[in-house]
Image: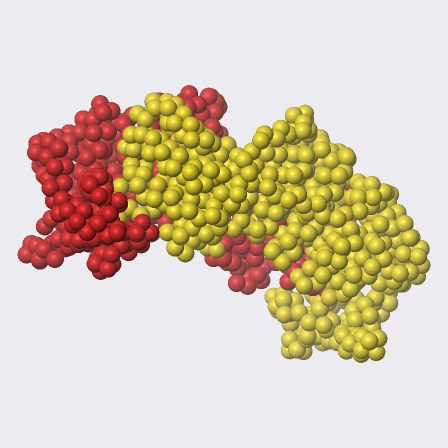
Chain colours: A red, B yellow
């Protein structure tokens, strides 16, 4: 009869490679059918249960406890296997000639003072402290460890930024620095495409595809998946962009991330736009209505990101210094007053990446929702064809009265700097919208000569209103008139961009120009991987304080203070 | 001193053109500064207030009441202006030689029995009944009116579908049928691009741009903005696609809409894929990770939709009958077990358009969220590198144990038909993942030989694992192995597509081949617009039952029953 036996070792620490090896070792013992050697977290207990490895004793385990389980063909085999556990540990450890490794970061730094990087892959609850020590001795950090709190991440990144250092991570799976792959990284060709990624496999997929297409990678900078959340404010992404901006070998930049918080997207895109290199952006799953704005190229998949970047390296135009036309300076918020619902929606979609917050009665996300459609707020886009406005009233494409009254109201708001309008021509629409709208625009000029008017005209040459003349009439007022949504958005973006401050976060670029030298703390396999790539490195034989025993640790902590 | 005076007329009906003209008429009277003639809805009262046109009396108005307001320089001018209101009505009405118009739909139909369309733009609360009458006499309906309830829309569209008729709308602003523009429509060239749009200005922007690019439109079918909501289930979009499928003049189809409900997207895309013509899709603001799947082309802006459609008309390849390779038939749900978080996220993003519902621990929308990441449900995508799985355990890229245990569990679920895996090669990863994974796949073949395995391999030729050999080892098990996400998704989609039923909604195609002949009820300007385009039409001089008096209407209703 099959029997399952377990043992709990409170507060015992082993690294995860050793845990895997021990589990395999137990499984291979005579009479043993299956084994588990895990930290007794709720998730791990549930997983054991699925493999029929959960015992009553095991259920009582706490997250800090090591839980050892074997399922064997009989009582005897199970007992013997458990008894074998400690000798398995000894055997595994004697296999590793680890005696020559330094035991702490400080010692490692004495042996290899030229190290400019520390790779950290210790368990999450110890990781922040180790990273903090690395910053203290002036090193950049690759923080592979996950299960690090967001508060710790904020503290580490803020500190790093002040020091001009980089913290990639936590939960940073991948980076390529000066040709050396850190963590999980593919062997890719050296080249002129630099990557910043808040996504490990995102970087792997893009860099592999670039290399498979015959092009190469200059640097690939990982940031950890939370960097573009509003708590972190994209510190590492911004630093990464700054590195690639300064790095002469980088000709084209790729930025990959899950969709950022809207206010962060604005900040990141603004920084990317200030770079005099093409930047390919894949905010995976983030809806976009523009394919290209200025030097920014928006793509919707990892493969497309790689393909676009490779094609841009072959395009000399992209290296040219961009023309800067003289643009009016907006003195306040944008107010978009639309007669076309879909045009309003598409404008909102495109503008939300650059202007934030932006409110609307056709909001895309709930937090953009304009409480009262009659009252604009900050940047606002209004669809005046919505049901609420059309009870007993002609559609705004037929009758300009409502829109012109609203425009008057917006103009009286001193916080407003730009008015955006659409004029949709064709059958059924007002016979001469430009006439009424132009007159209204000219009237505002008396009160607010500095106001900027931007008008999107949709129609064909054969439309009854005479498109050419409509455009001329509108242009006479000084309004900027476009017949393409993309051009309208690009114009608005450049206009607001001009008045943004340039963001140049502090970063020591020398570390990226110097050869890569690393101290590795945690998974030994990462050390071997670095050395196999012919970079200089040293491994730290790290043990948690007090052997991982939480009670002892807190006593030690108290004694220190 | 300025004085504002108002008058309320309970339950009075005037069409919105007349209201606009009356308001202008009042404004132009001597001593009058501004005037308002509106139905007294809360929104309209608020709008009056903003123009300093709201009085105490006015505030007491009810949504069915007509409210007349004037602001004048003195008491006398205000009183005189209000007194002038009725003579203004008489003057306006005598301007219109409307006596020869029929007074009802039935009468109009006797005069023009060959009419195949009824255009309805009466106020929302009367619109559903008029549309219902139009269906009863076998006409297709263009329903411009807004403020129609969703329940009424369901009833109308369900009835129309049974009769093989089309209801475009409610709130359908735009359509082009056999070259005749309905509602708001641009004068565009005739051509081979057919459009279905749940968006009026969306259709206008796309058709104008197509025409400006030198190509042309066969048909543009509006559906109303709610057609792709889960209540309506895309009835009109599906009928529209079926019309364009059958229409010999249509070579390329464009579908434009705000993002549909996920289950509707699946249905619509499935129907679009069954059409032997290229279909360009712009679900405005809907994130997509694929640019092309089979005959479907995904674009992210209205301009891009037009440009892609035009380029497809010039591409003869797109007319070729698509090759159908022999695909395995999936016998159940897809379970994706990923080691790469971003690969999982991108796969979910691409698959959610075709497989629905689909659950995940890296869900994009809340309703996709997998309650317990240890328990799959329907179609499921799991990222096994998430924090919860990695406490004290190596990442699944290094250690396959957790993933292979999970795979075993999925295989034991008889509802599962397809297993999707990623294998990410490179430094830091497992030295030979294919070996362990292949062995596990072969083991499942004993129990479930019909299971389909699909594997996405990410890496380069220079990676330490030997990519070629990894692929060969996986292929030996009978697994379908891809090195491109796009190809993986396309394969999965085609495999599941094969087992879907084709949707062919009932529709009378004759009405679209016959010349356009219409009965117009509501805005007279739409009638003139149709006639100016040299199509046959008749206008109905429609009045609401009981002159719009709600009380009288309900008494009449009771007497009839």
Q: Quadrant of the C terminus of chain B?
A: bottom right
Q: Quadrant of the N terminus of chain B?
A: bottom right
Residue shown at 18% from the left, 38% from the top? A521
- The answer to which of B406 and B27 lies nearer the viewer is B406
Tell whether A255 sits left or right of B227.
Answer: left
- The answer to which of A512 and A181 lies nearer the viewer is A181
Tell whether B65 sits left or right of A92.
Answer: right
In the rendered image, residue B56, in percent from the top left (x then y), is placed at: 64, 78
In the rendered image, residue B242, in percent from the top left (x then y), is placed at: 72, 43
Residue shown at 47% from the left, 57% from the top? A367
Which residue extends farthest left?
Answer: A559
Taking A289 as reference, is B432 above or below it? above
- The answer to which of B278 and A170 lies nearer the viewer is B278
Taking B44 as reference, is A461 above or below it? above
Tell whether B134 sits left or right of A186.
Answer: right
Taking A250 as reference, is B16 above or below it? below
Residue shown at 53% from the left, 45% from the top? B355
Tell whether A103 sits left or right of B269.
Answer: left
Q: Quadrant of residue A97?
A: top left
Q: Can residue B56 be seen from the camera position used here?
A: yes
Which residue extends farthest front?
Answer: A1
Q: Quadrant of residue B555?
A: bottom right
Q: Can residue A335 be seen from the camera position used here?
A: no
Q: Quadrant of residue A27?
A: top left
């Amino acid at each position: 009869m099959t029997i399952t036996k377990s043992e709990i070792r409170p507060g015992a620490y082993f690294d995860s490679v050793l845990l895997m090896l021990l589990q395999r070792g137990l499984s291979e013992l005579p009479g043993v059918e299956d084994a588990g050697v895990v930290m007794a977290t709720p998730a791990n207990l549930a997983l054991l249960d699925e493999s029929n490895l959960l015992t009553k004793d095991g259920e009582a385990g706490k997250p800090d406890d090591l839980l050892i389980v074997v399922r064997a063909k009989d009582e005897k085999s199970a007992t013997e296997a458990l008894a074998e556990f400690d000798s398995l540990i000894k055997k595994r450890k004697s296999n590793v000639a680890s005696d020559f490794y330094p035991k702490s970061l400080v010692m490692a730094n004495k042996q290899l003072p030229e190290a400019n990087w520390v790779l950290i892959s210790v368990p999450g609850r110890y990781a922040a402290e180790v990273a903090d020590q690395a910053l203290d001795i002036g090193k950049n950090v690759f923080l592979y460890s996950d299960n690090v709190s967001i508060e710790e991440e904020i503290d580490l990144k803020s500190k790093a930024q002040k020091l001009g250092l980089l913290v990639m991570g936590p939960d940073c799976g991948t980076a390529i620095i000066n040709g050396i792959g850190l963590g999980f990284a593919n062997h890719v060709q050296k080249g002129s495409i630099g990557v910043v990624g808040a996504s490990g496999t995102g970087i792997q997929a893009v860099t592999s595809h670039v290399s498979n297409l015959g092009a190469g990678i200059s640097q690939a900078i990982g940031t950890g998946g939370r960097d573009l959340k509003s708590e972190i404010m994209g510190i590492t992404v911004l630093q990464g962009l700054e590195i690639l901006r300064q790095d002469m070998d980088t000709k084209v930049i790729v930025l990959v991330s899950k969709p950022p918080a809207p206010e962060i997207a604005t900040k990141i895109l603004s920084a990317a736009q200030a770079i005099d290199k093409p930047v390919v952006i894949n905010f995976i799953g983030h809806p976009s209505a523009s394919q290209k704005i200025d030097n920014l190229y928006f793509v919707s998949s990892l493969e497309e990101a790689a393909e676009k970047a490779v094609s841009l390296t072959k395009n000399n135009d992209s290296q040219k210094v961009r023309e800067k036309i003289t643009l009016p300076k907006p003195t306040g918020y944008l107010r978009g007053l639309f007669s076309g619902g879909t045009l309003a929606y598409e404008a909102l979609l495109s503008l939300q990446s650059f202007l934030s917050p932006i409110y609307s009665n056709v909001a895309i996300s709930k937090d953009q929702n304009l409480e009262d459609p009659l009252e604009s707020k900050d940047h606002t886009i209004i669809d005046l064809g919505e049901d609420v406005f059309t009870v007993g009233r002609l559609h705004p494409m037929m009758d300009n009265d409502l829109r012109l009254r609203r425009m008057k109201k917006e103009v009286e708001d001193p916080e407003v700097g730009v008015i955006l309008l659409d004029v949709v021509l064709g059958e059924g629409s007002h016979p001469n919208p430009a006439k009424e709208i132009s007159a209204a625009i000219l009237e505002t000029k008396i009160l607010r000569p500095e106001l900027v008017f931007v008008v999107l005209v949709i129609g064909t040459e054969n439309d009854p209103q005479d498109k050419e003349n409509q455009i001329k009439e509108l242009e006479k007022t000084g309004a900027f008139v476009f017949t393409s949504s993309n051009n309208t958005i690009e114009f608005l973006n450049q206009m607001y961009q001009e008045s943004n401050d340039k963001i140049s976060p502090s970063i020591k670029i020398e570390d990226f120009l110097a050869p890569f030298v690393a101290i590795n703390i945690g998974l030994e396999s990462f050390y071997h991987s670095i050395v196999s790539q012919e970079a200089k490195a040293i491994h730290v034989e790290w043990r948690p304080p007090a052997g991982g025993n939480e009670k002892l640790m807190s006593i030690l902590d108290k004694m220190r203070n």
